[in-house]
Amino acid sequence: EAAIKRAMGKDKTDYHEEVYEGYAPHGVAVLVETATDNPTRTVANVRMHFNKNNGSLGTSGSVSFMFNHMGEFKIKNSGQDIEEMELELIDSGLEEIGEDSDGNIIIRTSFSEFGNMSKALEEKNVEVASSELTWIPTTTVDISEEAATEVLKLIDHLEQDDDVQKVYHNLR
């Protein structure tokens, strides 16, 4: 019976979500979102990537104060009036509205207002192309192209780790 219970429990993988913080070379702040069934392995891998690429893994809170955790909605621009949309959504927690480089409308709201904004957009029959919770840097860092290559090398190594979901940074 004990063997059967153990075998039945093997399909139930318990994933933990963790956010690791650190600095890439040249003082660029980095946030790493992970989802893992083995946090010990994940922190060791993240630390290894930082160390091998001249970065340093920090403690909780060492970098996150430089980012805002926000909800972001991407809407296909089909001629909507952005100013009118802003007035309609301000009571639903709208913090920022604008356009991205592809011409899509980007709506940002605080982390706590994500559900309210989602509901408001649904009630107004606005078709959302994508929505996610993201970390937006409050300040960005300008560095030389050569230095940026070092930073992007670290970010690339982190993104290739199986447990890493997303990597955020404040490099402009």
Image (cartoon, grey):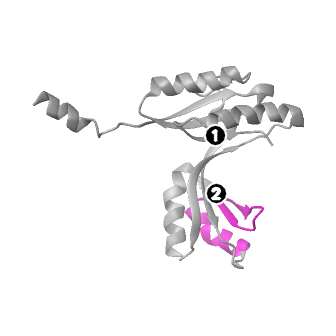
Query: Secondary structure under badge 1?
Result: strand
Residue matched to label 1 = 167
Position of the C terminus, as image quadrant, is top right
Percent x, y for residue 89?
61, 68
The magenta-colored residue range is 82-108
Q: Which of the two marks, 1 or 2, is nearer to us in this view?
A: 1
Pick out the residue farthest to the bottom. Answer: 79
Q: Which mark is residue 108?
A: 2
Query: What secondary structure is found at the residue carrying circle 2?
Result: strand
User: Which amino acid type is marked by label 2?
Assistant: Arg
- In the rendered image, the vertical position of residue 161 relative to residue 111, given as above or below: above
Question: Is residue 131 among what the camera can see?
Answer: yes
Q: Which mark is residue 92?
A: none
Q: In the image shown, does 70 or 17 lie closer to the viewer?
A: 17
Query: How much space separates mark 1 and mark 2, taking CA atoms?
Result: 19 Å
Residue type marked 1: Val
Instruction: Say which label, 1 or 2, has the lower sequence index.
Output: 2
**Residue 51 % position (x, y):** 67, 20
Pick whichever, 40 or 137, lies toward us: 40
Q: Quadrant of residue 95?
A: bottom right
Q: Residue furthest left?
A: 1
